[in-house]
Image (cartoon, helix red, strand yellow):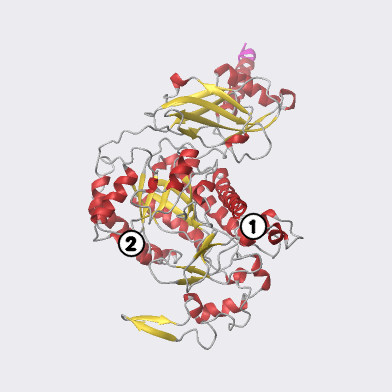
Amino acid sequence: MIVMETFFVNKFRILFYTLFFIFLFLFSSTSSLKAVEITNDPIFIVINFSDSFHNLDWAAHEDIWQKNIKPLAKLRLRNIKNILNYNPTQSQYILAWSTLMEYTNYPLDKPSDSSLYTIRMKRMMELSEEENFPIFIPLNGFQWWDELPEIWNYWDYDGNQTPGCKNNEFSEVDDKKDDKVIYRCKFEKLRDPLFRQRFIKGYNPENKWNVDWEDWETPMKISTRNWGGGDILVAPPPNIVNHNNSSISFNKLQTQRYTSLVDTISAVLNRWDKQGKQYLFAGISIGTEVSLYGSINPKKNEIKAYGYRALQDTFCPQNNPLCGKDANWNSAELRQKREKILFNYFNGLAKIAHDYGIPKQRIYSHVWNEKDKSDIDYVNGFGSSITLYSRPGQSAYGIANNPLNFSLLSMSLKKNGYPGWAVPEFAPLVRDDKNWHDALYNTLRSPVDVPKVIDIYNETDILNTAAIPQLKAILNENKIVNRCMVSEVFSALPNESVDPLLFEWNVLNKKDNATKMEVVLWDTNQVPVSVNESTHVYSINVKSSQEDALTFKLPKNMPEGLYYWAVKRVGCNGEKWTLSNLSSFVIQSANKRPFLENVKRWVLNLFNRNSY
């Protein structure tokens, strides 16, 4: 009798542990490819910190950082919140902060946890968490790369080939005005003796492939900025297209560093996700002010289109160096090709952030684009930066008083269903009380559409100015503007799920005007770049489109392969529509699945759960 009882007890234990481990296998946590979850889509008003804040020693030894530097940064962050008298429980906006992450403006290295830009990124997010102050991160890998002469100095082999900055004149003073010293050498970095040594040592004629060209035959030697008045000379505009003409391309170096930083951001976001702190992340921008035109001649300050090296590397075979010149493309063809280059650039970098789990609703491009369509050098940078993995963004200075009055911006938004968008640099040119009022209210209270992010430039420029009372007023105003809007949704399905039974998603803003909803599928093994490439569209019951969570069952007997999908919502008489973040899944036939996977699917079907 005792033997029989022992036998049944052991059988019971075996059955119990077997079922227990099957349960763990079936219902354990999902793939690491799942995006960081977001539950809302608020409007962020961001204050950018520059100057002495930007130039803090972010990579200082830990003791120095904790004792001396971090307290200074915290004081600045607390000061702006106190001045604006911001109360998050009473505002319809979320106040956030930013400071530029100029990750290509660091000396040559192999990206790692000890890279100076990686340390800076971790400490920026550390500040955000400790101060409970949301952060917007401008990932500026385009405008500043002076610290990399090893990949851009193609012309000056001895220090005497750069006019005004030759070895015997780089430190000479030309004039003094209002106690301001005006040097003969306008390229500030080249006035630094230690940097000059690196500059000369970094000379390599192959570097001409890493800079952009002002025509089919002329690599650019400098880039001219007129920011804040007066010309600033910096490194040449980079060639943003990858190539194999030199040992390392700018595009490859930028992508390596960008990927490393996105990995760092993703790790923090995953921790915040588990701790319920997702609200601390306002997003990233990819840029800053990316364009393929600018000031070519520092004396004339004329804006001209360039990008000829990028054009050659994108549209011509490597063994035909005269292709671009011989093609004789007209201005319309050149515009279309420049727009394609910009799209490829933003699409590639946004896709990397997407693959690391950063939601589309927190990824923005950043272009500079105030050319009119009638201008021969017109390029629609804003429209070209709209991708399936990100939202568009554009600086607003000359158009800040009412961005939607800028036809290029409003036209691009309307053509694309008014997607979420950003103004990653924002300030009116005339900064008195009236202009700050008009700029803020016309931008954030528009009855047509409003950006999800505006980043005020800069903290030091707005202190003790008319900007402060106007910002305080709009931050603390609760009046809701009635406008027709269509919310995006957030997909809850991990990427590359195998044979999912259900799609699941959440509507981010419940009170909207959606009248139609669809699940869009791309059945291709290539990564989709346009909604026009989709091959299947399935309508969803509109009556349930306001629910917090929605589901969709896949059709049976779908062919094997890799699929991408998104949710499209339409409303406002068809004028506005949104597309969710993309997700991917794999269809696999039953006879190719492992036995336990089939058991898992049988049980999940029984409980009506998904297969991830």
Task: List x then y, in percent, for residue 161.
Answer: 59, 81
Task: List x then y, in percent, for residue 536.
Answer: 62, 27
Per the picture, the main secondary structure of the magenta-coloured stretch is helix
Mark 2 — residue? 71
The range drawn in magenta is: 1-5
The three-letter amino acid code for the residue at tag 2 is: Pro
The three-letter amino acid code for the residue at tag 1 is: Leu
Front-lying residue, 446 or 505: 446
Q: Which residue sits furthest bottom? A: 168
Relative to 75, 290 lies left or right? right
Mark 1 — residue? 311
Quadrant containing the N terminus is top right
Q: Residue 246's quadrant in the figure?
A: bottom right
Task: List x then y, in percent, for residue 283.
Answer: 44, 47
Which dot marks residue 581?
none
**301 to 440, vertically: above or below:** below
Q: Residues within 10 Å of mark 2 (few under 14, many from 20)?
A: few
| First in sequence: mark 1 vs mark 2 | 2
Query: Which mark is nearer the camera, 1 or 2?
Result: 1
Front-lying residue, 176 or 519: 176
Q: Residue 48's quadrant in the figure?
A: bottom left
Q: Is residue 529 magenta?
A: no
